[in-house]
Image (cartoon, helix red, strand yellow):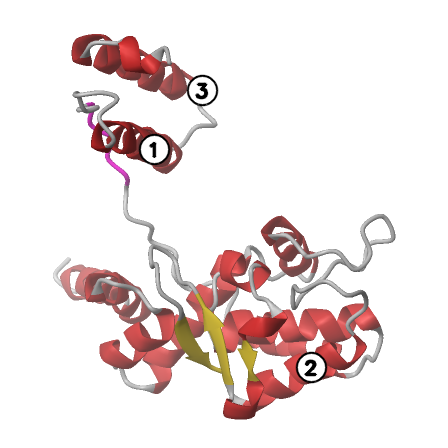
Amino acid sequence: GYVTKLSGGEANAMAMQWIAELKKDEKNKAATIAARLAALKGITKRLRIVGLITWTIEVKAPKVTQYKDTSGPGTEVVQKVVEELRQKTDEKSVRDLAIIHALYTTCLRRGELAALQISDLELVKNLIWITGKGRDDEESVTVPPKAKEALEAWLKIRPGDSKAVFVSLDPNCHGRPLSDNGIWRITTSYGLGRPHGIRHCGITRVLDKSNGNIRMAQELSRHKEPNTLMLYDDNRKDLAGEASKMLDQDL
């Protein structure tokens, strides 16, 4: 109720002060501050739509530097972990193998993987259904043979009666849905870094093996903007590095 009583000037002044306070903490990166401001703008937009306020937050978000590291842990590192897990038959290894397969070969985001329900699986048709980032409708993702095999092996021994595909094996929450942070802990425990890095690795590898087929990589990654895939392709080729070598020859 307090927000609806503010004037546009007061609301924007408070937003500016809030952003300034966030910037004082070095732990808050530009992307984090921009995301929080976007969330605030989203809330106020809804309030304006329903007629509770008439103003908008016009404070500009800090400029976010486009990320450069799109390589991830590297295919060889992922292959090594997969081979080690294939030799094991315990619950955790079987589950983690299915998770890594999904992150690398279908390039799912960890949130999409954590949200995956049994009802989303259509493995007879080699499909799973997800609601992707920034989308409202479900979309299908093709599951390749080895990833399907790993997923089916996990489903056969998956404990509990949760609707989630991936569940925790921790004694304190055994059988409960695995959170996206839980997936992060799993990938980092194998030296693979964050789950999104494995996704990056898969996308970059597709560009390598397809000789830079941007359309194919975009279909796999489900990025809305092809420019994002251009960044992956540029990093893969290291065009800036090649240009530097050309100039280096002049000296």
Lower position in the chain sequence, tag 2 or tag 1: 1
Where in the figure is residue 228, as x and y percent of width and height? Answer: 26, 61
At label 1, the amino acid type is Ala
Q: How many angstroms separate mark 2 from mark 3 (CA)? A: 42 Å
Observer able to see residue 62: no
Q: Position of residue 95 (x, y in %)?
A: 72, 71
Residue that carries the numbered disc 3 in the rendered image: 25
Residue labelled with disc 2:
83
In contact (CB < 8 Å): disc 2 and disc 1? no
Residue 93: numbered disc = none
Q: Name the residue at 29% across, 73% down.
A: 218
Q: Is residue 230 visible?
A: yes
Q: Quadrant of the C terminus?
A: bottom left
Q: Quadrant of the N terminus?
A: top left
The main secondary structure of the magenta stretch is: loop
Q: Residue extending furthest left?
A: 250
- Mark 1 highlights which residue? 30
Q: Residue 60 in magenta?
A: yes
Q: Decide which of tag 2 and tag 3 comes sooner along the chain.
A: 3
Task: Name the residue located 21 percent from the left edge and 67 percent from the top edge.
Answer: 226
Assess whether residue 244 is covered by the magenta stretch. Answer: no
87 and 179: which one is in front? 179
The answer to whether 98 appears left or right of 27 in the picture is right
Q: Magenta stretch: give its range.
A: 59-64
Q: Amino acid at mark 2?
A: Glu
User: Which residue reaches farthest right?
Assistant: 171
